[in-house]
Amino acid sequence: MKETVSLERPGQRFHNFVAILERMFAHQDGMIVASSLRLPDKGTGRLREHDVVIIRRTHHGPNLTAIECRDQGRMVGVPQIEAFAKKCEKTGVHHGIVVAANGFTSTARTKAKALNLTCMELAEAESCHHRRPVPQLHRDRGLRSRGGKRAKGRESIYGLYA
């Protein structure tokens, strides 16, 4: 029996999903979509990475929505939901969304609802389609990329919304 080989790189569907988000929010003033954003933990001060963060300016300051992308070979369970909820709490994120390639257990969905998290299957998230050119997004000073280096010449997201 012949095996089918996928030409898609691991994580490519999630990369495409982030591009869809960028297109959706590009036309809205005060909206920034940042991938692999590292935010300081309130308890330790260490930087913790979120897969995607949507930053919306409000008159009260920045409103942060974090998206956790789970591309496991199995469904997302309660431990992953609880860990993400705690990470959001410790990094000042206001709302969390978990996007999973292989779905969620029923108890994970129940726990997510209790913790005010949104669960989305990747196929559902990919269907949020808006055709606009993807803007060039820049990382803000004060927030570090995966390598830990700061971008130069830009204000912190906190300075923009003060």
Image (spheres, rainbow, N blue to C red):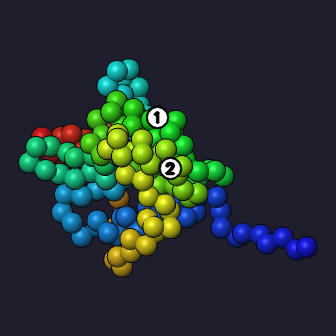
The quarter in which the N terminus is drawn is: bottom right
Give the percent coordinates (x, y) of residue 70.
Answer: 54, 50
Residue drawn at x 45%, y 67% is 124
Q: In this view of the protein, can residue 5 be seen by the observer?
A: yes
Residue drawn at x 21%, y 66% is 28
Amino acid identity at mark 1: Ala
Where disc 2 sits, the SS reads helix
Give the percent coordinates (x, y) of residue 21.
Answer: 37, 64
| Circle 1 or circle 2, nearest the eye | 2
Q: Residue furthest right?
A: 1
Q: For marks 1 and 2, give the CA distance.
A: 17 Å
Quarter of the view holding residue 50: top left
Q: Nearer the viewer, residue 6 or 159?
A: 6
Q: Is residue 5 above or below residue 156?
A: below
Q: Residue furthest left?
A: 59
Dot 1 surroundings within 10 Å: few (below 14), some, or many (20 or more)?
Answer: few
Q: Nearer the viewer, residue 62 or 150?
A: 62
Quarter of the view holding residue 134: bottom left
Residue at which label 2 appears: 106
The quarter in which the C terminus is drawn is: top left
Residue drawn at x 50%, y 67% is 123
Where disc 1 sits, the SS reads helix
Give the percent coordinates (x, y) of residue 54.
Answer: 31, 53
Dot 2 surroundings within 10 Å: few (below 14), some, or many (20 or more)?
Answer: few
The mark total stands at 2
Q: Is residue 46 above or below residue 65?
A: above
Residue at which label 1 appears: 83
Amino acid identity at mark 2: Ser
